[in-house]
Amino acid sequence: MVKKVTKKKTMNSSNRETSNIPKLFGTDGIRCTSNTYPMTPDLVLKVGQAMGHLLQKQPSRRGSDKRTVLIGKDTRISGYMLEQALSAGLNSMGVRVILVGPLPTPGIGYLARNMRADAGVVISASHNAFYDNGIKIFGSDGFKAPAEWEREIERLVAIEDLSKLLAPSEKIGRTRRIEDAAGRYIVYAKSSLPYNLSLDGLRIVLDCANGASYKVAPAIFEELGAEVIVLGDTPNGYNINDKVGALYPQQTCDAVIKFRADLGISLDGDADRVIMIDEKGDVVNGDHILAICALHLASQNRLPKKTIVATEMSNFGLDKIMKQNGIKVVRTDVGDKYVVEEMRKSGFVLGGEQSGHIIFLDHSTTGDGCVAALNVLGVMVGEGKKLSELRSVFEDSPQVLINTHITHKLPLEEIEGYTELIEKVRKQLQSNGRIFVRYSGTEPLVRVLVEGPDKRLITGMAEDVSNFLQRALS
C-alpha cells in the first residue's frame, strides 16, 4: 500500500504580508554560489543577527538569560569567511557561539540537543561543488528549524533595521572553539551498532568525499573493528565532492574490487547521505538501504505500524517488496525534511530518499550517512549475510532521471504546451509507469524522472520532456 502525503497550501494574512519578501531558504536551507547573493558575508551577518533576535525572544534552553548556538561546517574554502560572519551576527545580538569546525551535518543536530544549545547551524552546500555554500539551521531539539523560523528570518533580513535591535555593549556575545566535538560525535554514531556486534574481520572501502567526515568517519568504523581503506580524506578547500563521494561512487566500486573488500561506503560532502557498494562492486542506493533495514526491523517487531516513509523519487521496486512483506510505504515530497516531518507526525522510525538520506528516528534527527551504514552493517553481521545477498531483496524498475540546467523557473503548469506533453507521456505509460517532474530546491535544475518497463522507451520520454523544458526555461 502506498500513501502520498502532500502539504495543503493556504494563504492567510501573514502569508500575504511576506509574499513579496525575497526568499532565502530552499528545500534544505540557504544555498548558492559563495560570494554571490545571498551567500555573502554581509547577508550572512544579517542572517545571524535575525537568528539571534529570534532566539532572544524565546526561552533559553538552559533557563538563563544566555543563548548559545553551535556552528559546524564542511571543508569548503568559503566556510572560514561565512563562519566568522555568522558568528559576528549572532554575537552582536548577545548570543554566545561555539565553533566545532568540520563535522557532519547530523553531528550538529545531535550536539545541539546533547549540549543543551538553543540552536545549531551547519555551513555547508552538502553534495554541491566547492564554489557553493549554504546554511542549515537546527533547533534546540536537534531537528531542522521549522518553516516559520525561516520565513521570519527572511522577513527580518528584508524589512527590519537590525542595527536598532543590537545588544547593548555589556551583553555582546562571545565566540569560542571546542576541540572535542568530533570525539562526541564518534561515540554517538558508534552507539547505533548493537553492542553485542563488532566489525572485526570486515574490510571496508570508505570514501569521505574530501568533506566534513574525513576525520570522524574512518575513526567510527576502525574503532568498531573494521579494516578501513580510506578515500577522499585529503580536503584542500576546493576538492569536496570533486568526482568523489556519494554522487560519484565509481571509484569506491573500483576500490572494492581492487582490494577485495567486503563492501564500500560512499558519503557526500556533509555526510548526511550514503551510497553503499556490495562486494561485487554493485551500487546499493538509498532505496535498497531502506528495504534492507525495513525488513530487518519488521522481523524484530521494531517497525511501528509496519510503515516506512519514502519520496516521489523512490523506485516502484521498493513499494513492491514492501507490499509483499506486509509493509506500507508513505510517500512525501522530495526532501529529507519532509520525510522527517511525516515520521514525527505519524510515529514512524524509518524513512529516507533514494539519494541516500536515510533517517533512523529512534537514533538521529536527520539523515546520517555513518549511522545508516552502521545499521546495514548490523544486519550483515547479525544475519551473517553478504551485502550482495541483502541487496538482492528487490530489483529496481527501469528508471531514467535527467537533470537539466535552466536559467529561470516558472510554475510548470503555466508553461505553454507542458500540460499537454505530460498528458501524452502518461497515456503512453498507462498504468505501467509514471513521470515525475520537479525543480531542484538547491540548484538551477529541473529534474525529470520517468519509470516504466521499457528502458529505451522511457529514456526517449525523459529526453523529450527535458529538452522541452530547457527550451522553455533558458
Image (cartoon, helix red, strand yellow):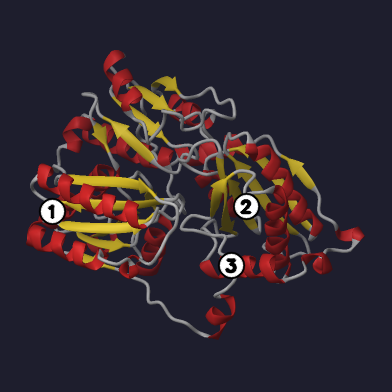
Q: Position of residue 212 (x, y in %)?
A: 54, 35
* Residue indicated by mark 1: 320
Question: Which label's residue is closer to the chain start, 2 or 3?
Answer: 2
The residue at 29%/24% (across/down) is 253
Task: Compute the Cα span from label 1 to label 3.
Answer: 38 Å
Under mark 1, the amino acid is Lys
Q: Quadrant of the N terminus?
A: bottom left
* Residue indicated by mark 3: 149
Task: Compute the Cα span from label 2 to label 3.
Answer: 20 Å
Instruction: Identify the element where label 1 is drawn.
Output: helix
Instruction: Identify the element where label 3 is drawn.
Output: helix
268 and 115: which is toward the camera? 268
Which of the 4 image quarters holds residue 153?
bottom right
Under mark 2, the amino acid is Tyr
- Answer whether labels 1 and 3 touch (C-beta < 8 Å): no
Under mark 3, the amino acid is Trp
* Residue indicated by mark 2: 37
